[in-house]
Amino acid sequence: MRRGLALALLVACKSRGEADLTIEFPADATCTPFDGTEVSAYLLANAASCDTCQCGACFDACHAENCASACDDGCPVDQLRTGISIQPPAGGLYTVIFDFSVVDAQGIRHLVASACAEVVVEDDGTATKSAVATGVCCGP
């Protein structure tokens, strides 16, 4: 695996929880998170697994009662270095998904990569302290 970048994802129910995630892409991957210029992130409660949420497959499953998101309209990828804050609706098992996109001259967003990890947020707001988000290349 080659490491794409390390980041802090703030998944606090209060100010207590913070998860340090490392995004890793396979050594033979043809993309990295920085192939995208924007990132969107969301926490999906009780999602099946990262295997079923690759390349935007779970985005439509994100609803107010089971999901929390950040950067819906895309944040600069460099914001990952300082952390992206997402407020989960309750404690539980969450699938954390990052979608990396580029926007073309017509303003159309194209997904180039995604990364996913599973974290546990306790009812008191504490979260899994570290996890690895496995990255995959999307699109042509």
Image (spheres, helix red, strand yellow):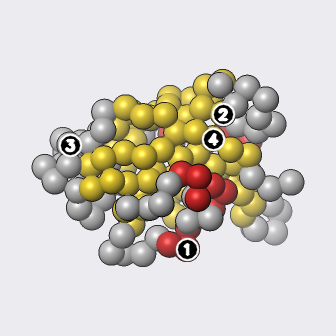
State the SS at label 2: strand
Residue 125 visible? The answer is: yes
Question: What's the amino acid at mark 1?
Answer: Asp
Front-lying residue, 78 or 96: 96
| Rendered image: mark on residue 60 | 1
C-alpha span from label 4 to label 2: 5 Å
What crowding class fits label 2: few (fewer than 14 Cα within 10 Å), some (14-19), or many (20 or more)?
many
Mark 1 vs mark 4, CA separation in Å: 20 Å
How far apart, in angstroms, are the residues tagged by discs 3 and 1?
27 Å
Amino acid type at circle 4 is Gly
Q: Which residue is mark 4?
A: 135
Residue bearing mark 3:
126
Q: Earlier in the sequence, mark 2 or mark 1?
A: 2
Instruction: State yes or no: discs 4 and 2 in contact (Cβ < 8 Å).
Output: yes
**For the residue marked with disc 2, what is the amino acid?**
Phe
Q: Is residue 134 left or right of residue 29?
A: left
Q: Position of residue 123 (x, y in %)?
A: 16, 53
Q: Secondary structure at mark 4?
A: strand
Location of residue 89 with respect to 20 vertically, above or below = below
Labelled pair 2, 1 in contact (Cβ < 8 Å): no
